[in-house]
């Protein structure tokens, strides 16, 4: 009889869910503080690069909120209307974050062009404050993004990965604005402020493409990575009672993986023997790839080969090693 998941399995799942929620909340708190500081300094100094960073951080704040909602939804157990669970909420979150970043980039480009056409002068004190703020923002987001990436990798969370990528972009843009303001401070030429903002926008657009691409692949049920599929194939090919297999399909939804495959065994196997073989294969696959849901369709080898030959014109394969 198939054994139910152990208590440690549920403990690990709950701990992973808790860590994702804590990480998402930390991201929200950090971004809220940075948005407020950047808005104050940006409005006071009139620096488009600082204001663009404030808008970018505001989109980070919204994205972090989306990520928090997504990780809560994605970890909701399957129900009658959603038998495959709610894992794709994380992919939708990544797509929404990509859209927010794109909007932020558009705003930055617009404001930078306006400042290039209408130059202004910023007081030294405000530029200096902007330099200090951008340096602090870059350091804060550097450590935050590293933490989020680590939790995302350990919990296999697309939503946190998208949030971490979003914040890592903020690190790059903060450094860019920091350097731009330094140039403005020492050259007293404010044209470097909007030019820096345009450079920031280009970095943001690159992040938008990467996030949207990753999220869309998961939403369109892209197969599992080659390494993970190779593990499944190795198990099928080393199982002594498996004479052949075909129609292996895999996909990923949130932190869960799904696989289905047609497995061929000896024609004279009993129903009980077929069931035991199926259970053995499923157990080995789940041991190699945690959070895997496996569906196996058992077929009699010789009868299936005869069908393939007569109906599809395929030559029979030799099941011997």
Image: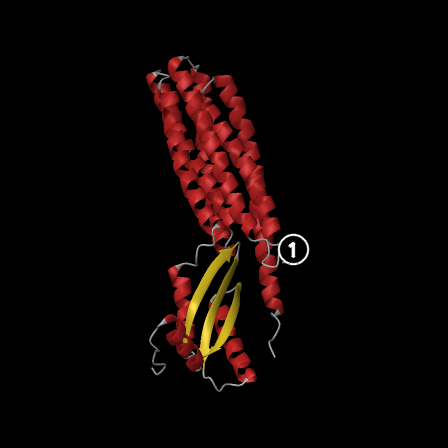
Task: Rate crowding at label 1 as few (under 14), some (14 to 19) or many (20 or more) other CA atoms within 10 Å.
Answer: few
Q: Which residue is mark 1?
A: 81
Residue at the spot x=44%, y=28% of the render? 106
Residue at image position (39%, 30%) is 200
Image quadrant where residue 302 sits:
bottom left
* Residue 249 to residue 184: above or below: below
Q: Residue furthest right?
A: 80
User: Residue 221 location, x and y as percent?
Assistant: 47, 54
Vertical placement of residue 55 versus 290, above or below: above
Q: Nearer the viewer, residue 261 or 79?
A: 261
Point out the residue furthest to the front here. 310
Judge by depth and name the residue closer to the eye, 72 or 141.
Answer: 72
Residue 303 in picture, x, y percent from top left: 44, 80
Residue 128 visible somewhere in the drawing: no
Quadrant assignment for the C terminus: bottom left
x 48%, y 87%: residue? 268
Which residue is rendered at x = 46% and y = 33% of the image? 102
Q: Residue 281: x, y in percent? A: 49, 75
Q: Is residue 115 visible?
A: yes
Q: Quadrant of the N terminus?
A: bottom right
């Amino acid at each position: 009889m198939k054994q139910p998941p152990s208590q440690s399995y549920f403990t690990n799942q709950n701990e992973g869910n808790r860590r994702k929620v804590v990480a998402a909340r930390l991201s929200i708190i950090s971004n809220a503080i940075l948005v407020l500081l950047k808005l104050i300094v940006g409005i006071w100094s009139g620096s488009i690069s600082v204001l663009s960073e404030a808008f970018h951080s505001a989109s980070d704040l919204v994205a972090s909120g989306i990520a928090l909602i997504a990780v809560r939804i994605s970890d909701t157990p399957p129900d009658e209307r959603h038998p495959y669970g709610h894992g794709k909420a994380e992919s939708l979150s990544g797509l929404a974050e990509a859209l927010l970043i794109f909007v932020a980039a558009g705003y930055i480009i617009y404001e930078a062009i306006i400042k290039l056409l209408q130059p202004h002068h910023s007081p030294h004190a405000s530029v200096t404050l902007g330099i200090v703020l951008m340096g602090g923002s870059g350091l804060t987001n550097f450590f935050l993004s590293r933490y989020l990436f680590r939790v995302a990798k350990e919990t296999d969370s697309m939503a946190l990965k998208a949030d971490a990528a979003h914040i890592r972009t903020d690190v790059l843009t903060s450094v860019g604005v920091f350097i731009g303001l330094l140039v403005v401070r020492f050259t007293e030429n404010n044209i470097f402020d909007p030019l820096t903002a345009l450079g920031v926008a280009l970095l943001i657009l690159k992040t938008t493409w990467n996030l949207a691409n990753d999220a869309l692949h998961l939403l369109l049920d892209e197969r599992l990575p080659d390494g993970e599929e190779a593990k499944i194939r190795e198990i099928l090919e080393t199982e002594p009672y498996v004479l052949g297999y075909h129609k292996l399909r895999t996909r990923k939804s949130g932190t869960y993986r799904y696989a289905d495959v047609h497995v061929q065994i000896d024609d004279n196997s009993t129903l009980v023997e077929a069931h035991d073989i199926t259970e053995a294969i499923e157990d080995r696959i789940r041991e190699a790839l945690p959070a895997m849901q496996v569906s196996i369709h058992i077929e009699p080898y010789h009868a299936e080969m005869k069908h393939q030959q007569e109906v599809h014109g395929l030559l029979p394969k030799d099941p011997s090693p």
